[in-house]
Image: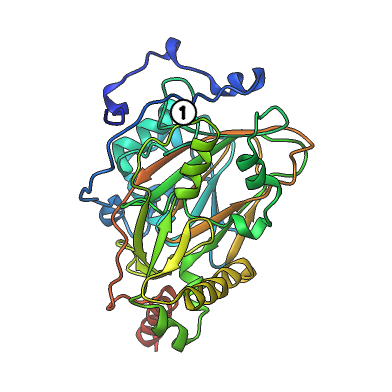
Amino acid sequence: MSPPNQNEQIIPVQDQIDIKKLAEAGYYLDFPKTTYPELKAFKHEDVGHRTDSKKSSLYENATKVFNLTSNIGTEIEGIQLSKLTNQQKDDLALLIAERGVVFFRDQDINPYQGLELGSSHYGPLHVHNVAGHPPNLPEILPIYFGKDVPGTPFERNFTTQLRASDGWHSDVSYELQPPGFTFLKIDTIPGEAGGDTLWTSGYTAYDCLSPEIKKTLEGLEAVHSGKEHADGAVASGKTSRRQNNTHTHPIVRTHPVTGWKSLYVQPGFTRSIVGLSRHESNTLLQFLYDHIAGGYDFQVRFRWTENAVAVWDNRVTSHAAIFDYLDEGKRHGWRVTTQAERPYFDPKSKSRKEELQQKKTEAEQKTA
């Protein structure tokens, strides 16, 4: 059975499920025994290639656009994701690719509109290998954490027995063609504070390494695996929907639109470095994990408000959720994730810092 194509399933408004109301009534996630064929390779056409480099359709129609930090994170006010024009969708793709993550508050977009936005414009939708979903909506991944979650030991360890820094990950990076964009809307927050999410820039994480370490990393590949997720699900009586959950990707990858180099490892799914001994691999990966966790100069922390949306590029960011609210209340939302190209490294590509410096030098020369 192939994953459903949401474009072929037009759900009348009166038949659409309000998953926020489901969450208010209690834990609702469905874990059917459905399995799917392995994901097949496809050619990804990134819409960021056909955008306006000035992103005018966004900037001229928003009431406010501002960067949260210098290296990652931009917030846009005055635009509804449910009403984007095709040009705005293209321009948004470039902005996300450049800034890593873009935030929108007070959004009216619902899960069905999210499915349409993702599948019609940004790429095939991903169905998570083990996570639960709303009834008959396998492409929607709910974010549901609170006291009423029927947790297994595996799930409790994930939220309560790990350091927060162990939670850094790029969504399902173990796939052959891992995700490009993730759209996440949080519609229920646990209280006045708590439940923030952090993102880190793979661009700047790479730029902050020494030239010798960069040379060492470029060309190396790492194994990414979701086996622990699959094994944990099966052990708790759930289903692993696909069996092929381990693939190898470059440690430094090139973004197809920006052309910038990005560090592409994280403790969530990266397991080992190809060609190195276990000791060498563990030592180098731990160094990189510590580099990511301690990179406060290339991180952004977002404080959620109800109906805020974050859209990020998994190819050049990692993120970590903060589980500091589990005794306080419920946090709920939903996620749509699109697949992109197979990760690659182009030795001719530049880093973000190199290109921005080059553009600055060229501008100064023109005005001299």
Q: Is residue 263 visible?
A: no
Q: Is residue 16 left or right of residue 330?
A: left
Count of numbered badges drawn on the protein: 1
The residue labelled by disc 1 is 111
Image quadrant of residue 315?
Answer: bottom left
Q: Is residue 115 left or right of residue 77?
A: left
Position of the N terminus, as image quadrant, is: top left
Q: Taking 20 as reference, is 292 above or below it?
A: below
Q: What x and y, as percent, mark residue 241?
A: 38, 35
Name the one closer to the observer, 148 or 232.
232
- Say which residue appears at 36% left-offset and 38% top-offset: 118
Q: Is residue 50 left or right of residue 218?
A: left
Q: Secondary structure at mark 1?
A: helix
Please, which residue is most extreme toward the left here?
43
Q: What x and y, as percent, mark residue 313?
A: 43, 54
Name the one closer to the observer, 323 or 196.
323
Please, which residue is most extreme toward the top here?
14
- Say which residue appears at 43% left-offset and 82% top-offset: 214
Q: Taking 229 as reference, is 201 above or below it?
A: below
Q: Is residue 338 left or right of residue 188?
A: left
- Say which residue appears at 22% left-offset and 48% top-offset: 41
Name the one closer to the observer, 137 or 306.
137
Task: Tell me which colouring the rendered structure shows.
Answer: rainbow
Name the one closer to the observer, 334 or 116.
334
Q: What x and y, as percent, mark residue 208?
A: 52, 78
Please, which residue is most extreme toward the front here?
235
- Say which residue appears at 27% left-offset and 78% top-offset: 348
Q: Is residue 341 visible?
A: yes
Position of the C terminus, as image quadrant, is: bottom left
Q: What x and y, as percent, mark residue 297?
A: 61, 71
Q: Residues within 10 Å of mark 1 (few under 14, many from 20)?
A: many
- Type of amino acid under label 1: Pro
